[in-house]
Amino acid sequence: MLQVADTLTSMTIAAGEAFIMSIQLRNRATNMPLDHTVRRLALVFYSGGTRAVVETIEGAYVNDARGPRFAFVRDGSLSNGFYGSTLQYEVTDRLFGSRSVLARGTMAVEASAATVETFGSIIGRTEAQFTLYFDDANIVRLMEQDLLPYGGAALPVAPTITTPAAISSDGTPQVGEQLTGTDPVVANGSITRRRWLRGSTAVATTQAYTPDATGPLTWSVEVLGLDGSTITSDSTITVAAAATPGTVIVDPIVTRNGQQYTFIARRTGDLSSATSRTMQVAASTDYPPGSPASDWPGGYAAATANFAAGSATAPFTITAPVAAQPE
């Protein structure tokens, strides 16, 4: 069976045997359980001296007659795969997105019988349950260990996707348009990796991505289950070439308010995407009706017309460089 030092500084297990351990968090002064729901414990195994992660067991939250705790359960394939190895491990607390180490030590895997224990054969086996006592500064001051029969609580199950990953865009997905990848909703697991893929090549890992090439593009999210298995949730779209912006013209009608002149720009072509165009008014020939050329000694004024997706028109306002003459 799994043998653990009371200080959580060492573990020994036989190859092929199930790994069954749980941890409960309590206040040392009051002996009351802490709020486990705001924490997320994990047991991370590293190869000798390299800090390379070789296995992570996410703590499964359990709350039954024994009280709240995190269970770390794997069948015999975990220890069987580590046969002959001495590993470092850390019990980590990912409170508020941070990562602090509650305990660390080594695990040695020794030889045993040839069979590998399955989940169906481990009910009633010995579980090592640790109680970690914290002081008011949230520091572990005491550990206690009990050996109890394992009753099947938090038996790891495969992860499932309840709502798949998705891609959103402002209009027709096209080159130069920002896309946003939406994470799937996951049960019995957690997200470990997000990627934008063009074929099998990763082109970005951020959720917001602006494609620079046409063709299929996939938002791929990888999920690690409580049983150690992984699944992916993918959403694929086809990126089109950037739409021809079409022609933009300015209506001859203008609204004047002192030095402010508001025009209406009209565009043709593809209207599906939002876009911005810089508009210029030449003072020599195109200055607004009712505004004398003396209002525009700088030659011209420029402003931006912001077209909403689906809209053919957009207002823009320019300011005369000198005070407008009274009407």
Image (cartoon, rainbow, N blue to C red):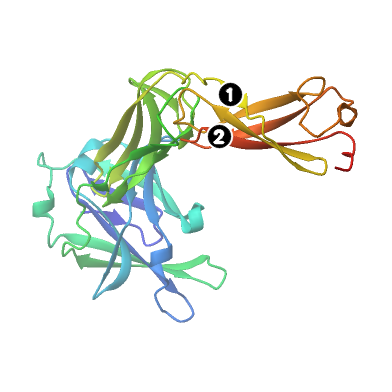
Q: Position of residue 182 (x, y in %)?
A: 38, 42
How many C-alpha atoms fall within 10 Å of the one at disc 1: few (<14), some, or many (≥20)? Answer: some
Q: Which residue is mark 2?
A: 313
The relative height of residue 140 versus residue 53 in the rendered view (above or below) is: below
Q: Position of residue 79 (x, y in %)?
A: 23, 43
Q: Which residue is mark 1?
A: 248
Q: Nearer the viewer, residue 150 or 202?
A: 202
Split into 4 quadrants, where in the image is the N terminus?
Answer: bottom left
Contact between labelled residues 2 and 1, with CB atoms less than 8 Å apart: no
- Residue type at mark 1 is Val
Location of residue 145 (image quadrant): bottom left
Report whether residue 1 is seen: yes
Residue 63 falls left or right of residue 252: left
Residue at x-position 48% and y-position 28%: 177
Report whether residue 46 is seen: no
- SS at mark 1? strand
- Residue type at mark 2 is Thr
Residue at x-position 54% and y-position 26%: 267
How many C-alpha atoms fall within 10 Å of the one at disc 2: few (<14), some, or many (≥20)? Answer: some
